[in-house]
Amino acid sequence: MSAKILLLEDDMTLNETIVDFLEDNNYEVISVYDGEEASTLIYEQNFDLFVFDVNVPLLNGFELLKQKREDGIKTPAIFITSLNSIESLESGYEAGCDDYIRKPFILKELLFRVENILKRGYFHESDSKIKIDTNIEYDTSSNLLFINTKEVSLNNKESKLLKLFLQHQDEAITHELIYETLWQYEEVPSETALRTYIKNLRKLIGKEKIVSIKKVGYRFTSK
């Protein structure tokens, strides 16, 4: 069964272009032109992914997704927008998006992001807490780590990395996949920074949990 995508884009030409492209790549796409119509559809139907433009009529993409996250809807979301500031990027992630693509973009880039999110299999179960050890839990809905029930601070990339490990427990995770997950399209990945994130996570959850695989990447062990 193909993944079902809700597209919110008020530019009619771009809306139709994206729909045709994603359908040609075997996705089912329902498209709307304003935030209120999207909100109604989310109550009526189940979707595997949201693709929301930000500046749309009646209810903008940020507010729409924020409302849905508050309602407990965990469907992954990509924002598409012409906004370029760090503040708008921060607003998007604070609203609960999983990825972000700036206009203008090529359709293949959008497809890559769609496939990447669906392939990763974001957590959408009702119980969002994943037990790492007897006294360590990670909450996938709030992206918070708890040790002995106390919240432990992680920076954004450390949190993304831990979530990736938990989604692929006992699997070899390549450096390439880690770089794609932690660094945005326009950012330059840093091997030195990645080693720092790994070191910090090992201090918190145990060195034995994250195993280095020479010339490949890492493996998070559930044992």
Image (cartoon, rainbow, N blue to C red):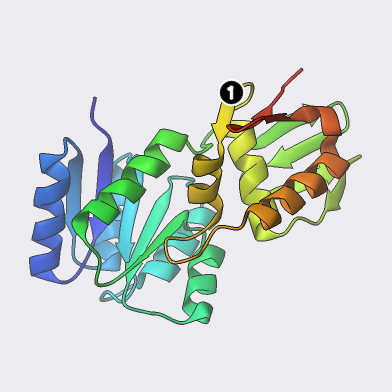
Q: Give percent across and percent down for residue 119.
A: 40, 34
Image quarter (top left, top right, bottom left or bottom right) of the C terminus: top right
Residue beneath disc 1: 171
Residue lying at 9% horizontally and 59% vertically, measured from the top left: 16
**Residue 83, percent from left and from top:** 37, 79
Residue at the image point whose x is 35% and y is 73% from the top:
60
Of residues 43 and 164, the one drawn nearer to the viewer in this rendering: 164
Residue 36 in picture, x, y percent from top left: 29, 65
* Element marked by disc 1: loop
- Is 104 on the left-hand or right-hand side of 87? left
**Can residue 109 be seen?**
yes
Q: Quadrant of residue 103?
A: bottom left
- Of the pair 20 and 186, the residue shown nearer to us: 186
Q: In the image, what residue occupies the spot 21% across and 61% down?
A: 106
Q: Quadrant of residue 9?
A: bottom left
In the image, taking residue 195 as reference, residue 95 lies left or right, namely left
Residue at the (8%, 67%) spot, across then down: 13
Question: The N terminus lies in which quarter of the figure?
Answer: top left
Above or below — where is 190 with respect to 4? below
